[in-house]
Image (cartoon, helix red, strand yellow):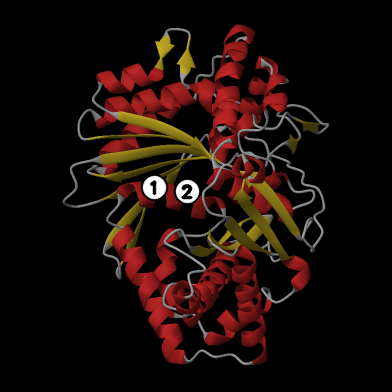
Amino acid sequence: MNETYFKQLEETLYHEQLPNGLNVYILPKKGFSKTYVTFTTNYGSVDREFIPHGKEEPVIVPDGIAHFLEHKMFEKEDGDVFQKFSENGASANAFTSFTRTAYLFSSTDLVLENTKVLLDFVQQPYFTEQTVEKEKGIIAQEITMYDDQPDWRLYFGAIENMYKEHPVKIDIAGTVESIKQITADHLYECYNTFYHPSNMIVFVVGAVNPEKMMTFIKEDQASKSFEPPQEIKRFFPNEQNAVAISERTLQMDVQKPKVIFGIKSNNTTISGKEMLNYELSMQVAVEMIFGRTSSFYQNVYETGLIDESYSADYSMEHGYGFTMIGSDSINPDMLVHAVKQTITDNSKEWKFSEEDLKRITRKKIGFFLRALNSIEYIANQFTRYSFNNMNLFDVVPALENLTMEQVKEAFESLKNENTHSVFKIIPNLKKNDE
């Protein structure tokens, strides 16, 4: 078992890759009574075209299948897995993102027993056509529910505007039409391809004895048989640099208009430290120019163009990335104009000093260190970083070493108007006329 001590954070991370390829990470936290365990696969909603395990030709599976599979994993022939966790005093959950599917529990007692439940249910799939058909109605209701949520529609509307081909533009849950096409064979095909231990991470954090937990997981995995690891070949369409749609408006039942100004990123094939540095540079640039301590924020807040719903951030995964600046606004067009003008002004004259950079990086370091008090945050973020060949605990030194040159270079990617897109939701005019 490998040990890595992060002196600055006073944390020791334990790691071992098991013979079946499973990576196990354990982070004991002093003073915590709760333990949080995640079992995550490097598989999300964007993985719709791939070569299935044991086959030679690529397939395209129905949209929403990763999320559908996550739902079905909890239902077994002998009942519902949530019941087993509940009997052991644990709180269990799962989520599917664009790039990951995670299964997790937290508990203060019977941690090894709950870890056994987690490992077993994720590694023992059970799908039948009958249970699959039943699930379609449940997920269709979930999709319909999200379709009625303005903030969700705003977020995905902005992504749909930016991307023409990449599957990130497709809702994680798919559509009512796409999930109708899902069969038990589809689920097994995806499961057998992406749920191999070599494509997964177990992360344990909290009140845990690392040697005891590692031994327990190793013995559990040694008692199970798996196919030999096989490289997963995923395919993604070529995506243009420019946005698909520059501006779009949707009418919904809202009291106040909503708007997102999206900026599509094209530097999305990097990984490892290069990705970490670029991502942090972008986040600092966006915070510096559009954050809540910026002159831009003060101006648009004082003129009533934004309210407490305002946000400005940068998101990135391998293959896609975007900046989103948005808020509920009494005048979304004026807000969009202010964003564009701010980008133009900073293109002509960079208005920030080294002291500004230090202030923003110190602020981000402070947020990060506070977040390390949340074992949920650590577990969910650690796996995301790992799947991109990054280390969560490199964030602080990377921020400390960030240069103004890196931040200005990141800002350059915000200037291209072909990568700008606006998505608005306005009050339903017909309803207001009634």
Q: Secondary structure at mark 1?
A: helix
Q: Decide: marks 2, 1 in contact (CB < 8 A)?
A: yes
Residue type beneath disc 2:
Thr
**Image height of 229 relative to 336, above or below:** above
Q: Quadrant of residue 100?
A: top right
Residue occupying image coordinates x 60% and y 10%: 128
Task: Looking at the picture, tell me which residue is in the foreground, 109 or 292.
Answer: 292
In the image, farthest residue toward the front: 434
Q: Position of residue 8 (x, y in %)?
A: 30, 70
Residue occupying image coordinates x 33% and y 58%: 371
Q: Position of residue 286 (x, y in %)?
A: 54, 72
The answer, for residue 98, to whether it is visible in the render is no
Pointer 2 residue: 383
Q: Position of residue 349 (x, y in %)?
A: 62, 92
Q: Quadrant of residue 175?
A: top right
Sort mark 2 into few (<14), some (14-19) or many (20+) by Cα contacts within 10 Å.
many
> Relative to residue 345, is residue 366 drawn left or right?
left
Q: Secondary structure at mark 2?
A: helix
Residue type beneath disc 1:
Ala
Task: Looking at the picture, tell me which residue is in the foreground, 189 or 169.
Answer: 169
**Gap in Å between the C-alphas at discs 2 and 1?**
7 Å
Pointer 1 residue: 379
Residue occupying image coordinates x 76% and y 34%: 51
Task: Looking at the picture, tell me which residue is in the foreground, 150 or 91.
Answer: 150
- Quadrant containing the C terminus is top right
**Image height of 417 relative to 187, above or below:** below
Q: Position of residue 88 (x, y in %)?
A: 25, 22
